[in-house]
Amino acid sequence: MAPSAIFASEQPPLLLADGAALEVISDAVDKVNKLKGLSSPIAAYDSESKFDVAKDKASFRQYETACERVRDFYSEQHARQTVEHNLRMRAHFFDPKRKREEMTIWQAMERLNTLIDDSDPDTDLSQIQHLLQSAEAIRRDGKPRWMQVTGLVHDLGKLMLFFKGCSTGQWDVVGDTFPVGCKWDEKCVFAEAFGQNPDREHPIYGTKNGIYTPGKGIDQFMMSWGHDEFLYLVLKDQSVLPREALAMIRYHSFYPWHHEGAYKEFMAAGDEVLLRAVQAFNPYDLYSKTDEEPDVEKMKPYYMELIDEFFPQKVLKW
């Protein structure tokens, strides 16, 4: 896809059938072996992961050799994630006239199960299976219950594909995230594609700090619109998840920060805790993917208990 073609016409709203295309790309970034056995003691949430010690991590997130559809995806994402687009999507999310669908967490997982994600080169499993693999890996390493349920729900923001006006295409649902409103760091994946973004020439948005202040904290960032930010906005007032869990959800795709060390000059006191939390979660998102299908019905009773514990209102407004 030529970047110039991206702006030739706006994409029509996504149809349910496009869900299959979504997971083809998400399935095109992390391929691995089976989950390991259970460990009984409760481990600190930021202790080193154990399930993935025998896995070859060099085969994951190999974007330089990624298939053409992943390159095309990031060319479009980087060209279209502008400040104007992000302000418009947030205005729609918070619009009191927007009819928000109501679902339980498990109902949301079942609905998400039809989707496939275009930014991920690594697995052919459905979304619900990936969520269960992430949660089971966290559980088997003996991590706290709140982190297990975070693994279970972390990708439910992809449901935005189903909600009118909440997304325009795959490019503003999945993929790595980054702040908009300042110059993009060269450590962003396929950073050269930002050359087609109109904010590049903006007198403020195109500068190093842009609309942000160094040392003021990462929560000042307007993160590129996608499933991470959408789910964070849904859950922050409709759960009893701790701050670390919400950071895992909001920033798990912010690879330039938690994996490449970019944007750290904007961090404030206390942000180190959030960074450790996201880094602790990352292996369970990235390396837990395997082609072995989890037994959904067998696992369901355990995870229904966790859902009831951390989402006491049961039915959420999406």
Image (cartoon, rainbow, N blue to C red):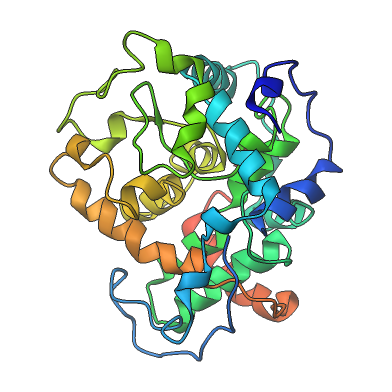
Picture quarter with the C terminus: top right
| 17 is higher (above) or lower (below) than 152 | above
Query: To which quarter of the image does residue 127 belong?
Result: bottom right
Residue ID at (26%, 59%)? 276
Left or right of residue 68: residue 64 = left
Residue 79 place in picture, x, y as percent: 56, 26
Judged from this view, the residue extending furthest toward the right is 17
Q: Position of residue 187 (x, y in %)?
A: 36, 44
Q: Position of residue 317 (x, y in %)?
A: 61, 37
- From the viewer's side, name the closer residue of 164 and 265: 265
Give the camera-side residue of 264 and 16: 264
Q: Is residue 193 above or below residue 257?
A: above
Q: Position of residue 129 (x, y in %)?
A: 68, 68
- Residue occupying the point 58% across, 58% down: 65
Residue furthest toward the top? 203
The answer to whether any part of residue 172 appears in the image is no
Residue 23 visible in image: yes
